[in-house]
Image (cartoon, rainbow, N blue to C red):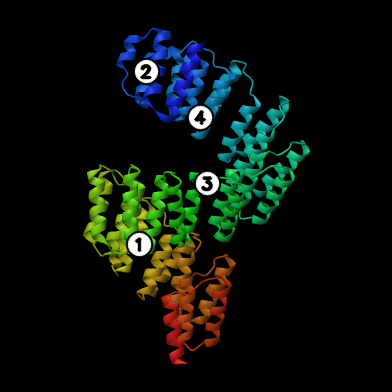
């Protein structure tokens, strides 16, 4: 028993860190207890493959429930492997092992396997515990299976198992993902009815849910309830607040949360740094994102691949290519492997500004490190070469995709349509559109918006109207690009009544005008000497907190000179 406990401890450490000493100790302990010195000598370094090769030769080890539980906990991706070994052994799995198996299959979204486990448990007269129900709720709700969820609640009632705070936290977390406001409020009422006191996990689930739905008044109210209950926010509470405020563009509130964290002496974790860099970077506040990144390095917190990716994207969007070089150097210093997402971001950044030589360097680097492009990387390359008018390269990329059995998706076809449309190659646009439909890919909002935009800019109003008709027949909802294209087209020919109808339609669909639309309105109203309409657009810009760009300023200069 003592040796088994030691082996479990060493295995847990090996599973978390894959360190050779702990793994060797695990093998040595079992070789002593199972007298398997011959197999011990055959096992090499501490890799997952070697661990499971060892298990295949020593299946009896899994008779130890502790070992079985630890393996499932730390190697959930090997659940089928472990389960097949367990089925072949003459051993009784207890409730703990079944709970862990349900969790593993739930995370993988394998409901069929969960049902099989429930049947096995019934056959062996192993009753479902509250822990089982909590796990099952999480995965059935995630799948949107409300019928099974209700059956489970009824089953709990039959077995006289009372829900606890974990049950309600799990349900709120799960329903929060599908933003079901009505059910979440019902759950809160049921919790009060059962006189269950909320804990920190419950409040965190609730704050995260309200934050995701954009109901920040409820977020503030929940924080006050936490304070009244004598529960202090932890790093996960603050992480959720930063993430949701940041995604909503409420960066002043993010700074307030950071000040509160500092007062509470709560240190940032890597997830918080990820959220901060992501949110400030996407808002174009590059200096603040860089400051957070430097702060992270000073605190000896190694940046994740995701953070490197976000930083490259931010600097690329701002045109700070020297900073991208510094980030790539940091990646080497931290011995971070370049993954396909990093390469895709680099291709996208360099492609947008027409730095084809840099794109070629990225592709060469990928070849040297044997990194195969995925669908997203190929789509970025199509955009890049298409924008540069390098259509031979575009065709070459399409051929490579088909050779590697990567079927172009709607995004790849949209990139291709946009490239040929912008260069005025409308015969190719029609050919690609037909090819896309023959591939059983349905055009989406972006497809039609791009076609409307390119036909409109080229003055091909007949083709543009045909696309609009097809869009209506397919019941496709228009987006902001669609409206921007039409407003610009009808503005050019001074059909301002149609423009106003389009603006009313946007309002009905809750689509906010972007800067491109407002610039277009200022330009066309100004050209037509409709100065009062220009004033209305400027007032709308102020209401939407939109700052003009260089195009806005040059349009104003032109209007002032004329009038």
Frontmost of labels 1 and 2 is: 1
Distance between the Cα atoms at labels 4 and 3?
29 Å
Question: Mark 4 packing: few (<14 Cα in 10 Å), some, or many (20+)?
Answer: many
Question: For mark 3, what is the residue?
Answer: 268
Question: Mark 1 packing: few (<14 Cα in 10 Å), some, or many (20+)?
Answer: few
Distance between the Cα atoms at labels 4 and 1?
44 Å
Frontmost of labels 3 and 2 is: 3
**Circle 1 — which element?**
loop
Compared with 88, 426 (above or below) is below
Disc 1 and disc 2 in contact, CB within 8 angstroms? no
Relative image position of residue 341 (x, y in whole percent): 36, 48
Q: Which mark is residue 104?
A: 4
Question: For mark 1, what is the residue?
Answer: 320
Disc 4 and disc 1 in contact, CB within 8 angstroms? no
**Residue 343 visible:** no
Compared with 465, 324 (above or below) is above
Frontmost of labels 2 and 4 is: 2
Q: Which mark is first along the chain, 4 or 2?
A: 2
Compared with 113, 538 (above or below) is below
Distance between the Cα atoms at labels 1 and 3?
27 Å
Q: Which mark is first along the chain, 1 or 4?
A: 4
Compared with 352, 226 (above or below) is above
Q: Residue at x 45, y 49 (%)?
A: 296
Frontmost of labels 4 and 3 is: 3
Q: Which mark is first along the chain, 2 or 3?
A: 2
**Circle 4 — which element?**
helix
Q: Which mark is first along the chain, 3 or 1?
A: 3
Q: Which mark is first along the chain, 2 or 1?
A: 2
Q: Which mark is first along the chain, 3 or 4?
A: 4
Relative image position of residue 535 (x, y in whole percent): 55, 83
Question: For mark 2, what is the residue?
Answer: 54
Disc 2 and disc 4 in contact, CB within 8 angstroms? no
């Amino acid at each position: 028993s003592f040796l088994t406990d030691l082996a479990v401890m060493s295995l847990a450490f090996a599973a978390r860190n894959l360190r050779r000493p702990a793994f060797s100790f695990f093998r040595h302990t079992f070789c002593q207890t199972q007298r398997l010195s011959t197999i011990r000598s055959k096992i090499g370094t501490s890799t997952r493959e070697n661990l499971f090769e060892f298990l295949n030769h020593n299946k009896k080890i899994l008779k130890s429930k502790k070992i079985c539980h630890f393996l499932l906990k730390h190697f959930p991706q090997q659940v089928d492997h472990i389960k097949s070994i367990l089925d072949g052994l003459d051993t009784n799995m207890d409730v703990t092992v079944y709970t862990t198996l349900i969790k593993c299959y739930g995370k993988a979204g394998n409901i069929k396997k969960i049902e099989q486990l429930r049947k096995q448990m019934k056959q062996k007269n192993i009753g479902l515990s509250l822990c089982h129900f909590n796990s099952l709720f999480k995965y059935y709700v995630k799948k949107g299976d409300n019928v099974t969820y209700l059956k489970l609640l009824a089953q709990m009632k039959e077995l006289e198992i009372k829900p606890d705070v974990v049950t309600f936290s799990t349900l709120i977390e799960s329903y929060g993902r599908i933003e079901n406001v009505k059910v979440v409020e019902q759950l809160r009422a049921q919790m009060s009815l059962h006189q269950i006191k909320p804990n920190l996990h419950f409040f965190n689930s609730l704050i995260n849910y309200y934050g995701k739905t954009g109901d920040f008044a409820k977020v503030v109210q929940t924080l006050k309830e936490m304070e009244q209950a004598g529960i202090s926010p932890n790093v996960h509470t603050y992480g959720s607040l930063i993430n949701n405020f940041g995604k909503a563009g409420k960066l002043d509130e993010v700074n307030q949360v950071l000040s509160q964290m500092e007062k509470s002496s709560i240190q940032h974790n890597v997830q918080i740094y990820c959220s901060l860099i992501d949110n400030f970077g996407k808002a174009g506040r590059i200096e603040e994102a860089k400051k957070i990144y430097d702060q992270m390095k000073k605190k000896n917190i190694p940046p994740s691949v995701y953070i490197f990716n976000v930083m490259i994207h931010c600097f690329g969007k701002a045109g700070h290519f020297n900073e991208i070089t510094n980030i790539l150097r940091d990646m080497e210093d931290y011995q971070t492997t370049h993954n396909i997402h990093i390469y895709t971001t680099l291709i996208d950044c360099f492609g947008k500004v027409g730095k084809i030589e840099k794109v070629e360097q990225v592709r060469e680097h990928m070849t040297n490190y044997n990194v195969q492009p995925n669908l997203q990387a190929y789509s970025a390359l199509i955009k890049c070469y298409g924008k540069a008018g390098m259509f031979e390269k575009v065709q070459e990329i399409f051929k490579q995709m088909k050779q590697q059995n990567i079927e172009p998706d709607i995004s790849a076809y949209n990139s291709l349509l946009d490239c040929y449309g912008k260069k005025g190659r409308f015969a190719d646009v029609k050919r690609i559109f037909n090819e896309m439909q023959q591939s059983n890919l349905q055009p989406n909002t972006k497809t039609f918006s791009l076609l409307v935009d390119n036909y409109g800019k080229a003055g091909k109003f007949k083709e543009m109207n045909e696309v609009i008709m097809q869009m209506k027949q397919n019941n496709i909802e228009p987006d902001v690009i669609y409206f921007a294209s039409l407003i610009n087209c009808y503005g050019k020919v001074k059909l301002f009544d149609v423009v106003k109808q389009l603006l009313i339609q946007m309002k009905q669909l809750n689509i906010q005008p972007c800067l491109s639309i407002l610039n277009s309105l200022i330009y066309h109203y100004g050209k037509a000497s409709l100065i009062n309409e220009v004033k209305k657009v400027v007032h709308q810009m102020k209401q939407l907190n939109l700052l003009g760009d260089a195009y806005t300023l040059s349009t104003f200069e032109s209007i002032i000179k004329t009038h």
